[in-house]
Image (cartoon, helix red, strand yellow):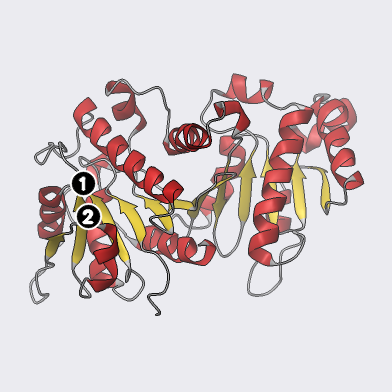
Amino acid sequence: MKNDMKPIAITQGDPAGIGPEIVAKAFRDAPQELRGCFVVGDVATLRRAAACIARPGIAPLPVAAMDGAAEAWAAPLRCVPVLPLPGLPSAVPLGQISGEAGRAAADCVEWAARAALRGDVAALVTAPLHKEALSAAGLAYPGHTELLQAEAAAHRGVPVEAMPVRMMLASDELRTVLVSIHVSLRDAIAAVTKDNVVQTVQIAHTALQRTLGRNPRIAVAGLNPHAGEGGMFGREELEIIAPAVAFLRGQGLDVEGPLPPDTVFMRARHAASHPGEFDVVVAMYHDQGLIPVKYLGVDKGVNVTLGLPLVRTSPDHGTAFDIAGQGVADASSLIEAVRMARQLA
């Protein structure tokens, strides 16, 4: 692999969760994939993670402090290069929600986002953080997406609403993009407006056109059972979603919908025996879109934030406090996130 691209920053995640250990495991088990990557975090936290994944007969995983991001390409294989941030805690209890851990996770994301916005790194890959820990730290952001949106807006000097972003969850079988993200179901239904549907499809179209090198085939899911059944089960499809699709088709986008949400994901799924009918499904709310992708395999899914002036990916699972420190967490999704970040960058 050539080292003619800038390094990729990986945030350590919530230090009380599995983030540090899946990061350590990725550097150990996929050294070629992790070349040119470095961790933004705390050296002692990563050393604790390296110790918890240690196994008899496998050489200990070294963790080395860096002075700057540019040193990432010089790091030896199967070594975890860490850019230490000052003030991060080193002994956060595992498996416990705390404001201290939430603040540490956020600090790493903020540093990496600003580095990416400056052009110092090619992309950032974020290990899982915990939303309650963020709240305990006094942060107003419910997750990575909103935090990164705020950082990008501040960098551009525009209001947050002028930096629209969307979450895409992608695997080799299915992609889905969400109209709304981390809001209640009641608020998610209220967010199904013509403007939001149009904006979501446009963001997905722009991102995938760049990735695929052609116009993507986009399916738009309905909100109600059977996509409303002609208004019998709700009128959002007739009054909001169908007009949005008609407008987008008039702009030349390859978009179809509203389609029944209980079958559209099967139609879009790409399998070895048959290609999917669509490149992406635009879902109306969080669980409608994420359950199908996660059901196909959490180890394969990657979370991608669309609409940002930087590349950001992450694994599609959480902090898993119940198994933190046991060394059993699966790093596959993180490794996939690194692969995708490199492709997008």
Residue visible at 54% across and 47% down in the picture? 309
* Mark nearer the N terminus (1 vs 2): 2
Q: Percent x, y for residue 253?
A: 83, 51
- Return the residue at label 2: 21
Judge depth for marks 1 and 2 and give the one in front: 2
Q: Which residue is drawn at 26% across and 31% down?
A: 103
In this orientation, does residue 33 appear? yes
In this view of the protein, which residue sits in the foreground, 125 or 72? 72
Report, in whole angstroms, how far the alpha carbon at label 1 lies from the one at label 2: 8 Å
Q: Is residue 144 left or right of residue 14?
A: right
Q: Where is residue 192 in the image (x, y as percent from the top left)?
A: 71, 27
Q: In this view, does 155 lie above or below 66?
A: above
Q: Where residue 254 sits in the image (x, y, percent)?
A: 83, 54
Looking at the picture, which amino acid does disc 1 mark?
Ala
> x, y percentage for residue 5?
42, 69
| 22 relative to 152 in the view: left or right | left
Find numbered disc 2 in the image and state the secondary structure of the residue it sits on.
helix
Q: Tell me, yes or no, whether the two marked residues, 1 and 2, touch with CB atoms within 8 Å.
A: yes
In this rendering, the answer to whether 184 lies above or below 26 is above
Front-lying residue, 308 or 325: 308
Q: Which quadrant would the N terminus be assigned to in this image?
A: bottom left
Residue shown at 21% from the left, 53% from the top:
83
Give the residue type that dot 2 points to. Glu
Label 2 Cα crowd, 10 Å radius (few <14 / some 14-19 / many 20+)? many
Residue at image x 61%, y 43%? Answer: 289
On the image, numbered disc 1 is attached to which residue? 324
Disc on res. 17 = none
Displayed quadrant of residue 238: top right
Q: What element carries label 1?
A: loop
